[in-house]
Amino acid sequence: MKTIRITAAISSVFAPKSLLVVIDNKDDNGFDKEYRSRKSFDQEFEAGTGRYVIKIFGMNQIEGSTTITVSGDFEEAQTQSSDEVDYVMYFVGTVN
């Protein structure tokens, strides 16, 4: 089985609210995966072949930031950062 690796680097020790990661395989009618964490993480998720949309919802401490990297068998690694207090990040790609 292939994997999608998601790495979250939170500048403070804990986020005020848990980061919510939603992994959705658009070629599969069912819901795929959901993951929550209040601290930095490096997590692998099993992934079947298909087109994916990954949504990450989070909140930073004031003057904090979060950087998210999606890699593994995701077609190409992608990184996004936010220093906004509330944020949503979207990653779109394919696992072959």
Image (tube, rainbow, N blue to C red):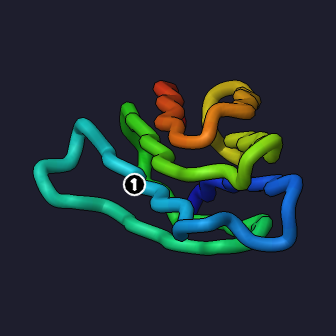
* 92, 17: nearer the viewer: 17
Amino acid type, label 1: Val
Q: Which residue is mark 1?
A: 22
* 56, 11: nearer the viewer: 11
- At 51% from the left edge and 72% from the top edge, which residue is drawn? 36
Q: Quadrant of residue 19?
A: bottom right
Quarter of the figure that contains the N terminus: bottom right
**Above or below: residue 76 compared with residue 66:** above
Task: Looking at this view, name the residue that lies furthest to the left.
Answer: 29
- At 70% from the left edge and 32% from the top edge, which residue is drawn? 82
* 49, 44: nearer the viewer: 44
> Label 1 neighbourhood size at 10 Å, few (<14), some (14-19), many (20+)?
some
* 85, 58: nearer the viewer: 85
- At 52% from the left edge and 37% from the top edge, which residue is drawn? 87
Left or right position of 78 against 22: right
Q: Quadrant of residue 13?
A: bottom right
Q: Can you give x and y, in whole percent of width and height, for residue 8 in the image?
A: 75, 54
Task: Looking at this view, name the residue that lies furthest to the front.
Answer: 62
For label 1, the SS is strand
**Above or below: residue 57 compared with residue 35:** above
Left or right position of 7 against 29: right
- At 47% from the left edge and 48% from the top edge, which residue is drawn? 57
Q: Can you give x and y, in whole percent of width and height, for residue 55 in the image?
A: 43, 42
Q: Can you give x and y, in whole percent of width and height, for residue 38 in the image?
A: 64, 73
Left or right position of 82 against 13: left
Left or right position of 7 against 88: right
Q: Can you give x and y, in whole percent of width and height, for residue 64 in the image?
A: 80, 46
Total marks placed: 1
